[in-house]
Amino acid sequence: MYEKKLFITGATGYIGGEILHQILQSFPTFEVTALVRSVEKGELIEKRTERKVKTVIGSLDSLDLIRKETELSDVVINTASNNHLASLEVIKSVLSKKTSETLFIQISGTGVITDSMDPEKYTPDKVYDDVKDIEEINSLDDSQPHRQADKLTLSIEETNPQFVKTAIVSPPTIFGISNGYDRKYSIQVPLLAIETVKVGYSFTVFKGDTRWSHVHIYDVGSLYVSIIKKFIEKEDFRSGHFGYYFTNDGTDFTWKEITTRVVEALYSRKLIKSKEIRELSPKEVDEIFHLPPLFWGANARTKAEAGRLLGWIPVKSTDSDFLSAIDTSIEYLEKHGLLGPGNQ
Ligand SMILES: NC(=O)c1ccc[n+]([C@@H]2O[C@H](COP(=O)([O-])OP(=O)(O)OC[C@H]3O[C@@H](n4cnc5c(N)ncnc54)[C@H](OP(=O)(O)O)[C@@H]3O)[C@@H](O)[C@H]2O)c1
């Protein structure tokens, strides 16, 4: 007899894979269903989880499927997108009518608190605390990245507070290799390394003095486990309008410091011929590197207190973990043939 039914999206992804891996370890009696986008990905997930996970094929646009799986599940986890409003509307409509206790956890990201890419308008000292600054976080401007999805998620629990709990997990720069099943590397640092090798030199947006907080992928997964434990043990935890969880630890390095480390690691592996880092405008980053400059050109600094109130303790996100993971990520990318002209 299964204890709970859990439905997860994004299970082949970097974040979703790590979460799924930790859920299978921590909750072996759960019946888990994963949304995948193809028969091949379904077979991959089922095989690599030793058939502990059932898959259903569709996308976030398969609204009837999302509706059905949300109706059937006690725990719903969306890691496939922090922007897809149509699927969130369907999840909201199902959850508003539920008559059994259900937890929904939506992925966000600290892009939502980024400041301007104009150095004249930077707010480098601003750090958002997910407990003390919750009202400010819940009133961010609608134009901020993935704010619309956050807002929609925040409106769900109040439609059915007797049966529904929601949480938003909003990670900063995630680093480290995921224990997941398909894509195992992150976005910001790996993309910087991949494109630096392609172009032959690296960049900072202007002087590179902006900062994002950071977290190891393992500690993101363990936060999900902490939230789910509170839910199944029927203990109080911050949810709904208060259920906004940042996930960082350690020092917020500048992108200049991080880029310097990336370049040194690439140079020592003979993947680039010089350690040149050019100061570029956001437009130049877009045109030359084909990368979204916001990831390296704005500040997004957080203090993850809400998770600590649950008893969550990050264990792999220290400064030395972060810096050494830059080298291990580059080693991983090289080993898997992802560093070189034309690769991604
Ligand atoms: N990595 C970070 O540092 C970070 C930090 C904060 C927030 N985030 C956000 O977290 C989310 C997940 O990030 P990630 O790094 O795990 O990305 P990822 O590795 O690219 O994984 C995305 C996952 O979602 C699936 N997916 C994408 N679009 C879908 C759709 N329309 N329908 C169904 N499935 C879909 C992908 O399936 P396929 O295998 O079929 O492609 C994959 O399983 C993104 O919204 C990202 O912006 C990431």
Image (cartoon, rainbow, N blue to C red):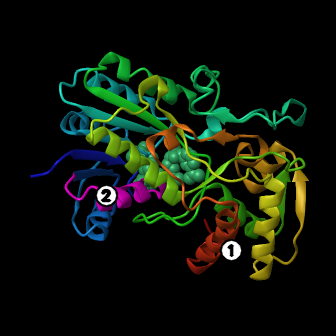
Q: Which residue occupies the foreground of this view, 39 or 314?
A: 314
Q: Residue at x 64, y 66 (%)?
A: 321
Q: Is any part of residue 319 visible from this angle?
A: yes
Q: What amino acid is at disc 1?
A: Gly
- Tell which circle, 2 or 1, labels the residue nearer the N-terminal end: 2
Q: Amino acid at mark 2?
A: Ser
Relative vertical location of residue 263 with respect to residue 247 in this rendering, above or below: below
Is 22 colored magenta in this rendering?
yes
Residue at 32%, 67% in the rendered image:
44
- Residue 163: % across, % down: 25, 25
Residue farthest to the top?
Answer: 159
Q: Between 282 and 222, which is closer to the camera in this rendering?
A: 222
Observer-side mark, 2 or 1, equals 2
Residue extent of the magenta highlight = 13-30
Q: Which mark is residue 26?
A: 2
Q: Position of residue 39 (x, y in %)?
A: 28, 59
Q: Residue at x 50, y 23 (%)?
A: 151
Q: Which corner quadrant of the image does residue 129 belong to?
A: top right
Between 335 and 76, which is closer to the camera in this rendering? 76
**Residue occupying the point 37% across, 25% down:** 89
Residue underneath mark 1: 340
Is the CB atom of the residue marked by disc 2 within 8 angstroms of ligand 1's nearest atom? no
Q: Quadrant of the C terminus?
A: bottom right
Judged left or right of residue 172, residue 116 is right
Q: Position of residue 170 (x, y in %)?
A: 54, 40
SS type, badge 1:
loop
